[in-house]
Image (cartoon, rainbow, N blue to C red):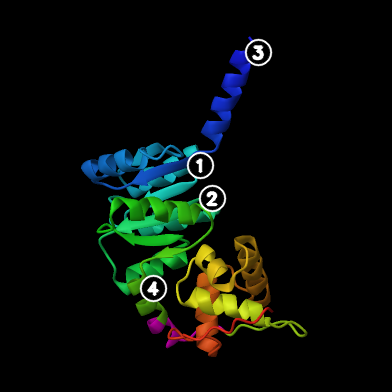
Amino acid sequence: MNDTSADDEVLLDESESKVRMLLADDHPMLREGIRHLLEREPDFEVVGEACDGNEAIRLADNLEPDVVVMDIHMPKVSGLEATRQIKEKHPTIAVLVLTIHDEDEYVMGLLQAGAAGYLLKTAYGEQLVQAIRSVVSGEFVLHPAIARRLLKSTVSSELPSTKIDEGEQVTAREMQVLKLAARGMANNDIAGELEIGIRTVKGHLVNIFDKMRVGSRTEAVLVALKKGWVSLDEEDIDQGNG
């Protein structure tokens, strides 16, 4: 009897540790292919499928998945509006957009709606798996070519001014982290580059967000670019011990 209870507890723990996903796309064959791909991962679980934006919103409310893999063009409600509504009600749900469209207006609209990443459907299977793992860990996912084009176009447009509190300043080490983030590096890559722990990188990013009054690394990089603190072509990163 005790052995059975222990087994049940192990199974419960394994289930709780799985990444729960909702697939939202109006093409059944594509959803089926993505489901088969993701369910090969032992820590992934597809808990629902939506064929339109309304159903995606409803299932997100009912199932509260960790991640929604979202298409842009769907019947009834677009992926953009579905993303906005899901993030408004469930800010902890990560929305990863998987689409054929890479136009700047789509990308920017979805980022403003709260999407955690933007991946093209031309991505191969392992890229999608890695992208989901990245957004679950709190990182932002964007194809490098799209990221650089988007940042270059955004930095030339008007952004609201950001004030650092009196007596507060971004430290030398925080600036190093910000520069590497502007180059599109993930947290683990930044940690390797600066020879510090990944938790330390996350701590620096939290401090940067607080000081700059922003809510994400994307906002922080855009503001830093606008202010001239960092450059997209930055090559020399000072290896100080800050």
Q: Closest to the observer: 54 or 13?
A: 13
Q: Label 1, label 2: how many angstroms apart (C-alpha)?
A: 8 Å
Marked residue nearer the N-terminal end (2 or 3): 3
In this view, the mark in front (1 or 3): 3
The amino acid on which the numbered mark 3 sits, given as a three-letter code, is Asn
Q: Which mark is residue 56?
A: none
44 is higher (above) or lower (below) than 88: above
- Crowd class of label 3 (few under 14; some 14 to 19; many from 20; radius 10 Å): few
Q: Position of residue 37 (x, y in %)?
A: 31, 42
Describe the element under mark 1 as helix, strand or loop: loop
User: Which residue lies under the disc numbered 4?
Assistant: 147
Mark nearer the N terminus (1 vs 2): 1
- Asked if the magenta segment contains residue 158, the reply would be yes
Near mark 4 (Cα within 10 A), the count class, few <14, some 14-19 or many ≥20, is some
Q: Quadrant of the N terminus?
A: top right
26 or 136, nearer to the observer: 136
N-terminal-most mark, 4 or 2: 2
Residue highlighted by disc 1: 64
- Visible residue check, residue 216: no
State the residue at coordinates (29%, 68%).
102
Kindly identify the amino acid type of the residue bearing the numbered disc 2.
His
Residue type at the position of mark 4:
Ala
Please provide percent x and percent y for residue 139: 50, 61
The magenta stretch spans which residues? 152-160
Q: How far apart are labels 4 and 1 at the CA level?
A: 29 Å
